[in-house]
Amino acid sequence: FTIDSYKSLEANPANTTNMILQHLSGQLAGTQRLEYVPAPFTITSSVRRINVCWFLSLMFALTTAVLAILCKQWVREHRQELPARSYQEEISLRQMRFESLRYWRVGGIVVTLPL
């Protein structure tokens, strides 16, 4: 959808070519002046608003995907079991990881991500 909507932000090259050909044929027939002045291209406000919404939606989707992958990596690291260590080391490492998840508010980030 974004690609089709994006095309409306540019002047149509076929229309420009047709206008140039009409001007040239008018010059050859001697009915038009010599210099060619193209009509200014304008974008309607509705086209502008639609494209802004499309690109904002694309940026939100990409941001959500990046944050979801980042949260998934954090959770995977938190759940990862390391090679055999003493119970005290495992408990302190797990507590440190848990505190870092709380410090970075990973749970809040996951909750705010749209489905």
Image: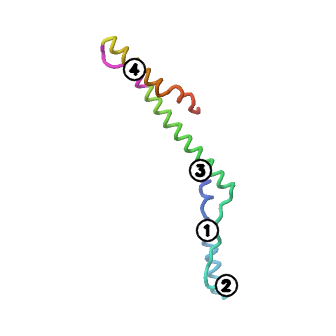
Q: Marks 2 and 3, Cα distance to the nearest angstrom?
A: 40 Å
Which stretch is magenta?
A: 76-85
Q: Amino acid at mark 2?
A: Gln
- Marker disc for residue 2: 3
**Residue tagged by mark 1?**
14
For the residues bearing labels 1 and 2, Cβ distance under 8 angstroms: no
- Marker disc for residue 96: 4
Q: Marks 1 and 2, Cα distance to the nearest angstrom?
A: 21 Å
**Residue tagged by mark 2?**
32
At x 62%, y 53%, the residue is 5
Q: Earlier in the sequence, mark 3 or mark 1?
A: 3
User: In the drawing, does residue 32 fall left or right of residue 58?
Assistant: right
Q: Marks 1 and 4, Cα distance to the nearest angstrom?
A: 64 Å
Question: Pointer 1: residues within 10 angstroms few (<14), some, or many (20+)?
Answer: few
User: In the drawing, does residue 92 fall left or right of residue 20?
Assistant: left
Question: Pointer 2: residues within 10 angstroms few (<14), some, or many (20+)?
Answer: some
- On screen, residue 16 above or below 34: above
- Looking at the image, is mark 1 or mark 4 nearer the viewer? 4
Task: Where is residue 16? Give x, y as percent.
Answer: 61, 71
Q: Is residue 3 magenta?
A: no
Q: Amino acid at mark 3?
A: Thr
Question: Pointer 3: residues within 10 angstroms few (<14), some, or many (20+)?
Answer: some
- State which quadrant residue 41 falls in: bottom right
Q: Marks 3 and 1, Cα distance to the nearest angstrom?
A: 21 Å
- Looking at the image, is mark 1 or mark 2 nearer the viewer? 2
Q: Earlier in the sequence, mark 1 or mark 4?
A: 1
